[in-house]
């Protein structure tokens, strides 16, 4: 933190406490010209105002609060760059990458630094790591029938995956697949789900407009939609069938996809980016390159194993 902000924060923090002290002293001073305990000369509905000071216990509480404020700012980091004499900090504020954060976290845990985040992580590791290690010994398919493990996996899913796939795991249009059905791009076995979570996935649907041209795109779109039983222009579809040979390298001659490549099945009427003519046209024109992030470094293999069990249980 720069010196400017250190001074700025210090002035506001200390100024507020000192201001409270002056305000208290000002209110305790008798400037009314009326002796304490005497009638102030004000009456309303039979109630007379008496010149009384704040109760001593109330005044003393204010003083204690002010003193505590100074002690707290001296002990803990509350004055900009000043860290306080206890050396406590909420977390490492200077890290610039996930790798650097992990490295600093490990160092704080090893050295017993007073870092609240490091302390909480250490306690969590000591408590929960043995549990996840035990879960990891059970195959994903078998773990999916363990209700306790599934609930743990669900909580991890909600924290890390629900942003894209939804809290109900039914996905959303725009490249986020529904995880509750049996339509899988890369395979729905426990091993494949875990592989996807650990390594992530990256779509590689190329743009075909330069190769096919606008008329060619119309033809391929018509043929593609016909594969799922849609009513299309038969002339366009017939012409598109010949052009589809270029697409068959990934999607297969029958259009049923290839899980080895993550190429979707085009015959089941399930569409990641929408199955309307404009949506399919856009896909063919510009391609799709959706990205599923890798969670190996974020969660670790043991937690990924539990999430995989939860995801597997959704489609069973």
Image (cartoon, grey):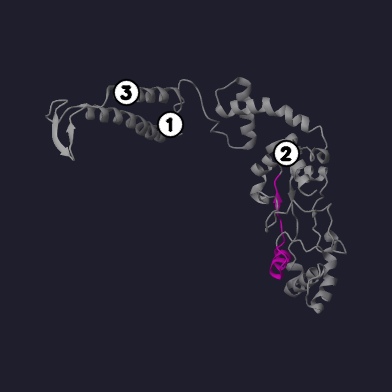
> Toward which corner of the image does residue 50 lie, by quadrant?
top left
Left or right: 192, with 163 as reference point: right
Q: Quadrant of residue 311?
A: top right
Q: Quadrant of residue 303?
A: top right
- Camera-nearest residue between 286 and 78: 78
Callout 3 secondary element = helix
Residue corresponding to mark 1:
80
- For disc 3, the neighbor class at 10 Å (few under 14, some 14 to 19, many from 20) is some
Residue with the mark numbered 3: 63
Residue 64 to residue 150: above or below: above
Q: Nearer the viewer, mark 1 or mark 2?
A: 2
Sooner in the amino-acid sequence: mark 1 or mark 2: 1
Question: Most extreme residue toward the right, as rendered?
Answer: 253
Residue 289: in magenta span? yes
Give me the residue at 25% from left, 27% from top: 54
Foreground residue among 27 and 80: 27
Seen in the picture, residue 149 relative to 38 is either above or below; the reply is: below
Report the magenta residues as a range.
274-293
> According to the image, label 2 marks what residue?
296
Residue 292 colored magenta?
yes
Residue 143's spot in the image, x, y percent? 80, 38
Q: Secondary structure at mark 1?
A: loop
For the question of whether residue 176 can be seen, the reply is yes
Pointer 3 or 2: first along the chain? 3
**In x, y percent, where is residue 70?**
37, 24
Say which of 66 and 77 sits in front.
Answer: 66
């Amino acid at each position: 933190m720069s010196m400017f902000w250190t001074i700025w924060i210090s002035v506001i923090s200390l100024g507020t406490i000192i201001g409270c002290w002056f305000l208290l002293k000002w209110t305790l001073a008798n400037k009314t010209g009326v002796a304490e305990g005497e009638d102030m000369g004000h009456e309303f509905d039979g109630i007379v105002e008496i010149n009384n000071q704040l109760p001593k216990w109330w005044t003393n509480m204010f003083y204690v609060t002010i003193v505590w404020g100074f002690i707290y700012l001296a002990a803990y980091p509350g004055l900009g760059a000043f860290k306080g004499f206890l050396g406590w900090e909420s977390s490492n504020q200077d890290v610039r990458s996930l790798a650097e954060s992990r490295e600093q976290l490990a160092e704080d845990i090893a050295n017993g630094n007073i870092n609240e985040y490091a302390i909480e992580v250490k306690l969590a590791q000591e408590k929960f790591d043995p549990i996840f290690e035990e879960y990891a010994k059970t195959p994903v398919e078998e773990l999916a029938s363990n209700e306790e493990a599934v609930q743990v996996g669900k909580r991890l899913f909600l924290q890390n995956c629900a942003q894209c796939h939804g809290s109900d795991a039914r996905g959303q249009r725009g490249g986020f697949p529904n995880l509750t059905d049996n339509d899988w791009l890369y395979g729905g076995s426990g091993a494949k789900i875990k592989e996807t979570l650990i390594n992530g996935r990256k779509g590689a649907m190329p743009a075909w407009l330069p190769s096919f041209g606008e008329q060619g795109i119309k033809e391929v779109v018509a043929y593609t939609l016909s594969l799922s039983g849609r009513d299309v222009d038969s002339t366009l579809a017939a012409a598109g069938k010949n052009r589809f040979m270029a697409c068959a390298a990934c999607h297969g001659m029958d259009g049923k996809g290839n899980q080895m490549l993550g190429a979707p099945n085009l015959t089941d009427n399930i569409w990641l980016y929408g199955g309307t003519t404009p949506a399919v046209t856009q896909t063919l024109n510009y391609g799709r390159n959706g990205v599923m992030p890798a969670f190996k470094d974020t969660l670790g293999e043991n937690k990924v194993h539990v999430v995989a069990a939860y995801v597997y249980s959704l489609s069973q």
